[in-house]
Amino acid sequence: MKGVFPIDKFRTLQTPFYYYDTRVLRDTLTTIREEMARYDRFVMHYAVKANANPKVLTIIRESGMGVDCVSGGEIRAAIRAGFPASKIVFAGVGKADWEINLGLEHGIFCFNVESIPELEVINELAAAQNKVANVAFRINPDVGAHTHANITTGLAENKFGISMQDMDKVIDIAVGMKNIRFIGLHFHIGSQILDMGDFIALCNRVNELQDKLEARHILVEHINVGGGLGIDYGHPNRQPIPDFKSYFATYAGQLKLRPHQTLHFELGRAVVGQCGSLIAKVLYVKQGTNKKFAILDAGMTDLIRPALYQAYHKIENITSEEAVEAYDVVGPICESSDVFGKAIDLNGTRRGDLIALRSAGAYGEIMASGYNCRELPKGYTSDELV
């Protein structure tokens, strides 16, 4: 079954562009709120890196969520979208001084700190502003995730976080700093995770670390388990909303949250992934020696995930009802990796047809580049195209 798109409106727009179905986005946000409401002290921060389209951010802000930022630019985007600084957490393994100062100036909720040198810089910059910075330490739990190697973040070999054996040392250092307030522990093991067993493994590790800290009479106010919940790229119509029920129930049942603690989440892909599609036009249909190529005006500059991660996106010809044929769907970029999919079944395709690359709401528009001096794709919401 194809997605429902305003084809007549699409024909008036310059392709390629991103289209965001706000009904899907709002339904997703409603489901998140309802599932989180089953439990006390659950807090959500949307991961801005997944999609920073201003219209998308505004809808998410209206839902009451906070945000997780990984750059000063994302902090600025969040502030412009109306998110209160008290709901902003700032993560990232390489925070520049100006980015830290920006967070301090706005009085953000928390810095997720990834190293002792970073902690020292935050303390120094906070002292210069006569402020105290709230920090949580990102601990690398050495927990693997069943996902693509490029998007695992919780193994000891990854660049992220502080090793478990250094946790006590870092906390002791922070407690002795006048311009630092240690408030929590932060974890994130990767993204596009569909096996709840991965999250159970993280819960077990967090429980171990908490027990260790409590043996030293160290109480942690906030536990942040990051995000990571995946979406169904194969069936965006059948499963437009991820399994938030199982996700939150897993943490509620497996993580031993103390009575004084809040549990924070940083979901990105699961929030916006299914609401977005990249809409492209067919430039040419080329008959090769053994296959047909559908050559689009969108390429890896507009949606890099297939080239970067060998990621799958469901591809649909949304303007044809002809018999299905197999095509290699490719872009115009001068790179052999500029391929969206091989041997893809599409309704008979001709020059000028519109193609939708589905489940592109996360890590699509935000990762677009100007390689080959191409213009960045614009983003439109269904609210605009009624």
Image: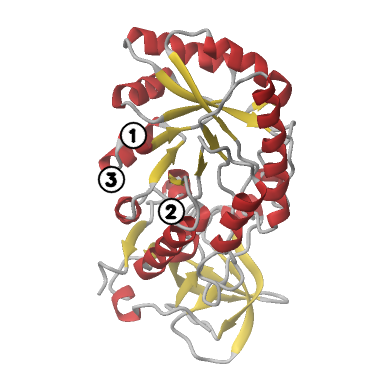
The quarter of the image holding the C terminus is bottom left
* Residue under label 3: 81
**Residue 99 numbered tag:** none
What amino acid is found at the position of numbered circle 3 in the picture?
A: Ala
C-alpha separation, residue under disc 1 versus residue under disc 3 = 14 Å
Dot 1 falls on a residue whose secondary structure is: helix
Q: Residue at x 47, y 57 (%)?
A: 271
Q: Residue at x 49, y 52 (%)?
A: 301
Up-down: is 166 above or below 21?
above
**In the visual, does 354 lie left or right of 160?**
left
* Residue under label 1: 86
* Residue under label 2: 365
Q: Nearer the viewer, mark 3 or mark 2?
A: 3
Q: Position of residue 272 (x, y in %)?
A: 45, 58
Q: Residues within 10 Å of mark 3 (few under 14, many from 20)?
A: many
What amino acid is found at the position of numbered circle 1 in the picture?
A: Ser
* In front of the other: 336 or 309: 309
Up-down: is 118 above or below 318?
above
Q: Residue at x 51, y 60 (%)?
A: 332
In terms of sequence position, does the residue under pointer 2 or pointer 1 come before the other?
1
Q: Nearer the viewer, mark 1 or mark 3?
A: 1
What amino acid is found at the position of numbered circle 2 in the picture?
A: Glu
